[in-house]
Image (spheres, helix red, strand yellow):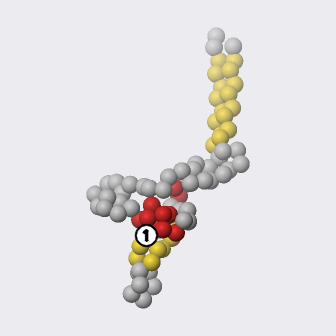
Amino acid sequence: MVTLGFDVRNVFDWRGEVGTTVNGYPHPYINTLFDDYSAYRTETGLGGGAFWEDADGDGLPGWVPVHDARLLSAPRTLRFSLGARF
């Protein structure tokens, strides 16, 4: 008896967001008192993540968006299996 298997996930390569909060492990202080990513999403209504900082040095802090791939679902995956029983 021969068994063939073929598993395809995320066929259209859709990369939606799966999480908004990432922990700061192993750093003990990152995202423990204040979670920048969730605050950014709540205040702006935008997806993704950002951190609060005075990026341009004008004395007025603001949100600095970042591309964090950990927030996106996995890309397309294909799995092929072959089994035989005698």
Relative depth, front residue between 73 and 5: 73
Query: What percent of the width, then of the height, locates residue 79?
Result: 64, 36
Quarter containing the N terminus: top right
Residue that appears at 41% across and 73% down: 52
Q: Is disc 1 placed on a helix, strand or loop? A: strand
Residue that appears at 68% across and 20% down: 3
Residue 7, quarter of the rendered image: top right
Q: Amino acid at mark 1?
A: Phe
Q: Is residue 66 above or below residue 28?
A: below
Going by the image, does 5 lie left or right of 48? right
Going by the image, does 82 lie left or right of 66? right
Query: What percent of the width, then of the height, locates residue 44?
Result: 52, 69
Query: What percent of the width, then of the height, locates residue 53?
Result: 40, 76
User: How dense is the environment of label 1, judged by Cα within 10 Å: few (below 14), some, or many (20 and up)?
Assistant: some
Residue that appears at 52% across and 55% down: 71
Quarter containing the C terminus: top right
Residue farthest along the left direction in this orientation: 28
Residue farthest along the bottom direction in this orientation: 58
Relative depth, front residue between 76 and 65: 65
Q: Is residue 66 above or below residue 7?
A: below
* Residue identified by numbered label 1: 51
Residue that appears at 31% across and 61% down: 33
Residue farthest along the right direction in this orientation: 12
The answer, for residue 62, to whether it is visible in the render is: yes
Going by the image, does 45 lie left or right of 78? left
The answer, for residue 30, to whether it is visible in the render is: no
Query: What percent of the width, then of the height, locates residue 10?
Result: 66, 45
Count of numbered marks: 1
Relative depth, front residue between 4 and 30: 30
